[in-house]
Image (spheres, rainbow, N blue to C red):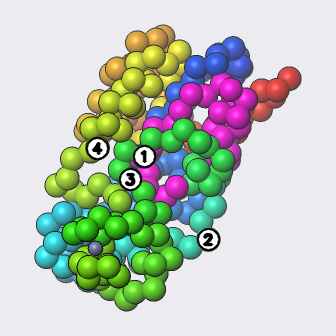
Amino acid sequence: MVNLDEVRQIIKDSNNIVFFGGAGVSTASGVPDFRSATGLYNRENNSKYSPEYMLSHEFFVDHPDEFMTYCKENLILDGVKPNKAHKALAKLEERGKLKGIITQNIDSLHQEAGSKNVVELHGNLRDYYCTSCGKAFDLDYVKGFDGEVTCDRCGSLIRPDIVLYGESLNQDKLSYAINLIASADVLIVGGTSLVVYPAAGLIDFYRGNKLIVINMYPTPKDKMADFLIQGDISKVMDELVEGIDE
Ligand SMILES: [Zn+2]
C-alpha cells in the first residue's frame, strides 16, 4: 500500500515533474474514453462502421461527410469542463513545479484549466486546416457546416488537427515529449491503459526513481512504478496537491 504522504512530499520537494496522461484524466469531466466498458468502442452507434474505422485516415478520405458528423456527435462536446486532475496539474505548473504535460487526449481540457506547456500527442479539436491549401480554421467555422467542411479559399476538404488511425504521430512533438520525460525528476503517469504504442513506450525513457502511476485498473507497466496508486485520478491528484503551498 502506497503511503500518500510520501508521494505528496516527493511532489512538494520537486521542481521538475512531468505528467503523462490519457483518456482516464478526462472521464470525470464526462469525456468518453475509447476502451472502457462505456467508451466509444463499446458504445452502440447508428452506423455500420466501427469507431476505430470511422476515426481512420481512410474513412476520412472516403466518407468525409460521415467522418465530420461522427466527430461532432462523439468527440466535439459542448459544456465539458476541466476536473480536479486538470486543475491540480495546472496549479503545479503555476507553482513552478511541473515542467510539462504530455497527453493522449484531444479535448484541450488541460489548457482550459490553465496549463501552458501541453504536448498533445494526438492533436486537438480546436484547430482545423484545409487538406489542400493548408489554411487554418477554428471550431466556430466548422460548426457552421453540416457534414463535410470545405475551405472558403479553395473549396477543398477541411479536417481536424488530430492524428487518425493510419497516420503517424508528429515527430517533433514525440521528440519533445521524450526529452521532457528523459530529463524529468518525477514522472506521474495517470489515466492511461498504457497499451497503445508508441505512446505507451514513452515512459521507458524515464531514468529517475520516482515514477508514480495512478490508475483505476492495472496496466502492463505497473511493475515499473515506484509508487502505484489505484484510484480515480481526479480524486488522487487533488489529494496529492493538497497543502502544496504550506
Ligand atoms: Zn483550402
Give the spatial CA distance, label 3 vs label 2.
20 Å
* Quadrant assignment, res 203: top left
For label 3, the crowd category at 10 Å Cα-Cα, with few meaning under 14, some 14 to 19 and many 20 or more, is: many
Please state the extent of the stretch shown in magenta in the rendering: 84-108
Residue 196 placement, left or right of 113: left
* Residue on which the image places disc 1: 120
Residue 230 visible, this orientation: yes
In the displayed structure image, the side of residue 97 where residue 215 appears, left or right: left
Q: Amino acid at mark 1?
A: Glu
- Name the residue carrying label 3: 123
On the image, numbered disc 4 is attached to which residue?
170
Helix, strand or loop under label 4: loop
Residue at far bottom of view: 146
Mark toward the start of the polypeptide (2 vs 1)? 2
Q: In the displayed structure, does residue 33 sit left or right of residue 96?
A: left
The three-letter amino acid code for the residue at tag 3 is Gly
Depth check: give the residue in front, 55 or 173: 173
